[in-house]
Image (spheres, helix red, strand yellow):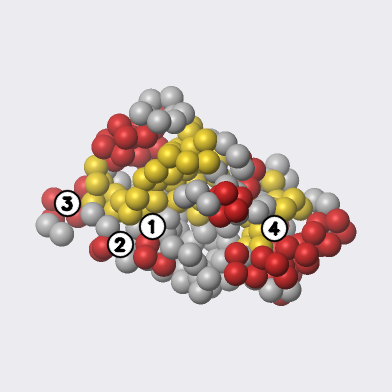
Amino acid sequence: MDNKTQDLVDKGIMLPLMEEFYTIQGEGSHTGTAAYFIRVGGCDVGCHWCDVKESWNADLHPPTLADTIVNNAKKYANTVVITGGEPLMWSMDYLTNLLQENNIKTHIETSGAYSFSGKWDWFCLSPKKTKLPLKEVYKEADELKMIIHNKSDFDFAEQEAAKVPKKCQLFLQPEWSKKEKMTEEIVEYVMKNPKWKISLQTHKYLNIP
């Protein structure tokens, strides 16, 4: 990458774009709603069950102008979900300002492991044990989405729930490869602890992106 391009990436004017697509939000609070997804490359959180490991190496994904991304998004939707990878590895200020100037709502899905940036209409925080969120990020959370892979993850979920604002919606989501076993566990847990809701990866059941 030449110095000029690197400078633009550092400022968030260009981003390592892995893919962008218009679909239905499959998880969490906005399940079932139409949104334009922007998947940014680059992640070092290292979840062993990640289903988008090809996003981890940012160098594989070409730096793309944020203006181009916004022009593509506004053809389709009034809500954009920025995901990854780990989108907060990059400055989100320029992209989100531009989206909001075009009357597009900005949502993010992040582990919170990097410094907060961007202007968000909805902030979905999904902490991972391998690289915890920064303290500054917890207070931004509108939604806490905890992935449940085994029983110990319930304790981790409670630890993380204690760090977010009271307004934050709390979700438990079974890790896809364990969904048969862990969905049953989650149902039982939520019935005993009704502050939590269940999130399912409905897009996988619907066989859509």
Estimate how packed mark 1 is, as few (under 14), some (14 to 19) or many (20 or more) residues with alpha carbons within 10 Å: many
Which secondary structure, mark 1?
A: helix
| Nearest to the observer: residue 130 or residue 146 | 146
Q: Which residue is mark 2?
A: 58
Res 163 seen here:
no
Q: Which residue is mark 4?
A: 172
Which secondary structure, mark 4?
A: strand
Res 48 seen here:
yes
Residue 181 falls in which quadrant of the image? bottom right
Residue type, numbered disc 1: Met
Q: Is residue 1 above or below residue 169?
A: below
Q: Earlier in the sequence, mark 4 or mark 2?
A: 2
Distance from the alpha carbon under mark 4 to that under mark 2 = 29 Å
Residue 79 x/y as whole percent? 48, 33
Q: Earlier in the sequence, mark 3 or mark 4?
A: 3
| Nearest to the observer: residue 90 or residue 150 | 150
Q: Which residue is mark 3?
A: 5
Between marks 1 and 4 in the image, the one whose residue lies nearer the viewer: 4
Estimate how packed mark 3 is, as few (under 14), some (14 to 19) or many (20 or more) residues with alpha carbons within 10 Å: some
Q: Earlier in the sequence, mark 1 or mark 2?
A: 2
User: Which mark is drawn over residue 89?
Assistant: 1
Mark 1 and mark 4 in contact? Answer it, CB < 8 Å.
no
